[in-house]
Amino acid sequence: MFDPNKIQSVINFEVFQYWDKMRGERLMPARADLDPADLRHLLPNILIHEVQLEPLDFRYRLIGTEISRHLNENHTGSWLSTIPHQKKPSKLWDMLEKAVTDRAPVIANPPYVGPYKEFKTIEDIVLPLSVDGEKVNMLFVCVDFLKSKRKLN
């Protein structure tokens, strides 16, 4: 079960609170419920995956500029199944699959392997979105690059 108290990143906690507010009494909000203007200051850290359920796959629809700065390639429009180090089985795939299966947020802390050596870890929060309130059709992700573990308190 998801515990928001385990979120280390201040920006990921803000994104979670926004997602939680937008879903209201529903299991998860729809993409149409999210207004990019509400999160303008966080857009560089936002990533959106389209979800294909059968067979399961994930397509990069949007990659924020801060995320792109840390990647070696632009994967916008690509399916994870076509990217060797991201296709199943990979930690990234497992994290996204868990959000789809559980229809609930997922937090992950993969090690940082990008070009900027001052960063030590990453915190990802994966938030499911649904048009019908039942099946996940998109994943709303916020990625924070951390130089050290941060505490909200």
Image (spheres, rainbow, N blue to C red):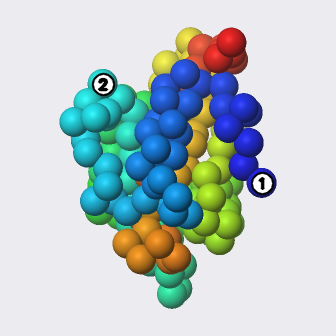
Query: Which residue in the protein does label 2 denote?
Result: 41
- Residue 151, image x, y percentages: 68, 15
x 66%, y 31%: residue? 7
- Residue 138, image x, y percentages: 42, 64
- Residue 3, image x, y percentages: 74, 42
* Residue extending farthest front: 25
* Residue extending farthest left: 37
Q: Quadrant of the N terminus?
A: bottom right
x 22%, y 36%: residue? 37
Query: Which residue in the protein does label 1 denote?
Result: 1
x 25%, y 41%: residue? 36
Q: Quadrant of the C terminus?
A: top right
- Residue 18, image x, y percentages: 44, 39
Earlier along the polypeptide chain: callout 1 or callout 2? 1
Q: Amino acid at mark 1?
A: Met
Work out whether 109 lies above or below 99. above
